Image (cartoon, grey):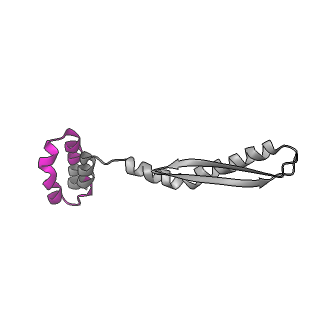
Amino acid sequence: MKITKVFYSKTFPIQMAWEKIGVEIETTDDSPRNALYEAKKLVENFFYESNKAAEKALQAEKEVITPTDSIINDIKSCKTVKVLEAYKLIAKSNKTVQEAYDNHLKLLTNG
């Protein structure tokens, strides 16, 4: 028996669905096994390379900004002392926020 073609496919889970990828390879050597290994490598490499962007997007969604981080970002975006003073009472309730407030107040008064 002479094998001239091999086929390899694999079904991958992606979020709430499945993706099936396959490849057919013509083989001229005596070892169809080598062709199957090559086909497997092609299919798996294609899947992982084609889904890198989707994986990065999922990771970005998982990175949650806490309310404290949001307030600190708002404090750091203040351009005047008068605007910054709106956060004075909020800063007193959290040590980390107070520290960010004090540092930005120093920056604005010395800058």
In magenta segment, residue 54: no
Give above or below for 30 relative to 85. above
- Left or right of 77, for residue 19: right
Residue farthest along the left direction in this orientation:
89
Q: Position of residue 11 (x, y in %)?
A: 59, 48
Q: Position of residue 13 (x, y in %)?
A: 52, 47
In magenta segment, residue 79: yes
Residue visible at 20% across and 48% down in the picture = 101
Name the foreground residue: 2 vs 34: 2
- Left or right of 13, for residue 100: left
Give above or below for 80 relative to 2. below
Residue 107 seen in render: no
Name the foreground residue: 97 vs 69: 69
- Kindly report the secondary structure that dominates the magenta region of the rendered protein: helix
**Residues in magenta?**
76-103
Residue visible at 43% across and 51% down in the picture = 58
Residue visible at 38% across and 47% down in the picture = 62
Residue visible at 74% across and 47% down in the picture = 38
Residue farthest along the top direction in this orientation:
95
Q: Quadrant of the N terminus?
A: top right
Q: Quadrant of residue 78?
A: bottom left
Q: Quadrant of the C terminus?
A: bottom left
Q: Position of residue 82 (x, y in %)?
A: 14, 59
Residue 33 seen in render: yes
Name the foreground residue: 5 vs 104: 5
Number of numbered discs overlaid on the protein picture: 0
